[in-house]
Image (cartoon, helix red, strand yellow):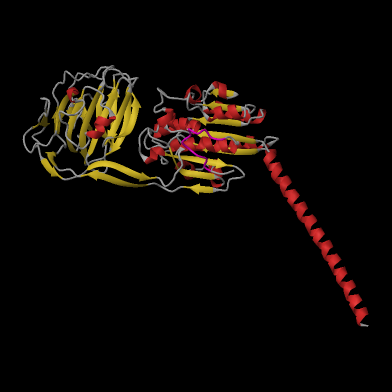
Amino acid sequence: MKTLKSLLSLIVLMGLCILSCKKADTASAEENQISDEQSLVKNALAAKPKKVLFIGIDGCVWKAITATNAPNLKTLMDQSYTSTNALAQVPTWSSNGWSALFTGVGVAKHKASDNSFSGSDFVNYPSFFRQIKTNLPALRTASIVTWSSINDFIVATADVTVKQNSASDNATEKRIIQEITTSNTDVSFCHFDDVDHAGHASNYRTTTQMYMDSVKAVDLRVGRILTALRARPTYNNEDWLIVVATDHGGDASHGGASYLEQNAFIILSNSAIAPQLVNTLPTTATESNPHSITTVDFKTNVYGQLPTLSTLNLSATSSFTIEFRARATSATSDPVIIGNKNWASGYNKGIIIANRNGIIRANFGDGTNRLDVDGVDLTDQLWHQVAIVVNRTSQKATIYDGGIQVAEGNISAVGDLQSGTAFKIGQDGTGNYSPYFTGNISEVRLFKSALPATSISTYSFTAVTSAHPQSADLVLYTKGNETSGTAYNGTLVSPKIDILTKNSTAITRSALTTPIFYRKTTDYHGAPYLYNVPPTILKFLGIAKPTYYDGAALVNF
């Protein structure tokens, strides 16, 4: 009986083992089937051709998108990687912004520092279309723009299949939709300009109807373009990266160094990108140097008169430098700090350095043409050591604050600046401009040459001496630290500045211990720059970024 029981037990055990093995084999087969299916899906996704649509909106302040009825852009922002703290480099001209968005490098390399593109280098730093042409020559590429300078200077004809300069945003929209719907396009860029035009006309403010209407209009364009894209018969079998970006922000205008002018946005949309909002704002700290001086209080009916300076040549071919130290106690209107012309019009022949709503504006006019360069924030009521350098060799007009460059413009279109009127401080050349400058002006220095940045930096916080490298070019130098009298006496050279008054106004002085602004240090907390866009596009396409790129890809695919 025991033997029979043992035999039965053995049979049962063998049966269980067989069943167990069959279950294991079945499970293994099912797992393999699932694994194979996942591989098929992965391979199918990988097999989809990668394509890029890059929409550029010139001068679009991102807050205008969220503040108005712009559903297409707003939806795209919500569903994508979106940086609302992206940065355009200074100077914040379109040349600089679009060059960064195409070349992957900053202004120190591409050198497109103003809209003339003078001195720019797209031979060594070509657009990302060059990398595409080199690595994936079979791809169809297109650059369709309203601002022709993008195609004329940045995008080389040989690097793209289609290149069109449009006469209007309407024409750009029509052509990009045609490209999307009638061709096997691979990488396409389109540029719209109307928002920037509206910004120049209405101060880039979200409170101005013209500007907001322009953003609504471009949003409708984006909507129609995306609708056309998604209507492609092959759309579901394609892997699209949609990029939307602007070239700069705006703060009344652009070109300067304020954060609002630098603040741009970047949108990246692709099925592999999880929605992400990158919006950390910068934090700043102001550094200053101690300063003590007793000097004249400039106010209504008090100003200074410079003598005729025969050795200061302001012709269309002559370079010069104007330096001064200023402290403003008002930030309204556009009173003159120093100038030699009638400020009733910026086109009038001559020079005006004004406190325009708290920001220094350097204006140059020849009677027909003008240049305005904005920089140096005086609203902190600190002293600021300002230098304006006009270099007729490079055709640059550059502003420095505390020895650091803050703004630059191209002065090639502006000729002779000799107005026939002597310079004044605290007033324009007529002596009758209203309002008067209110605050203090000292350390006035005029040189008959374009000082190099090293000299400006070295002597920003110290008096000029005979050891100054350009002391031989010094035309006028007054420290403005006299404790009495009616003049700023000359130092090193004889010309002085007479302090004049009207309506029996008394000359008063203040003993000031207000520091001199040195610099603002800004922590941008890792905010992306516009030059991060090209490496992102190249990475999506599987192309290694050039080693000279300043930027890196913003996302992984």
18 w.r.t. 226: above or below: below
Residue in view at x 69 percent, y 39 percent? 47
Q: Is residue 65 left or right of residue 439?
A: right
Residue in view at x 55 percent, y 27 percent? 130
Quarter of the image where one finds residue 362: top left
Quarter of the image where one finds residue 303: top left
Q: Does residue 549 belong to the magenta stretch? A: yes
Where residue 234 appears, as percent x and y from the top left, is: 70, 35
Q: Is residue 447 left or right of residue 81?
A: left
Where residue 172 appears, as percent x and y from the top left, is: 55, 27
Residue 134 visible in rendering: yes
Q: Quadrant of the N terminus?
A: bottom right
Q: Does residue 262 belong to the magenta stretch? A: no
Q: Is residue 303 left or right of residue 331?
A: left
**What type of secondary structure mainly makes up the magenta span?**
loop
Observer-nearest of 505 and 536: 536
Where residue 293 appears, as percent x and y from the top left, is: 13, 41
The magenta segment: 544-554
Residue in view at x 27 percent, y 31 percent? 454
Where residue 3 appears, as percent x and y from the top left, is: 92, 79
273 w.r.t. 320: above or below: below
Q: Quadrant of the C terminus?
A: top right
Residue 334 visible in rendering: no
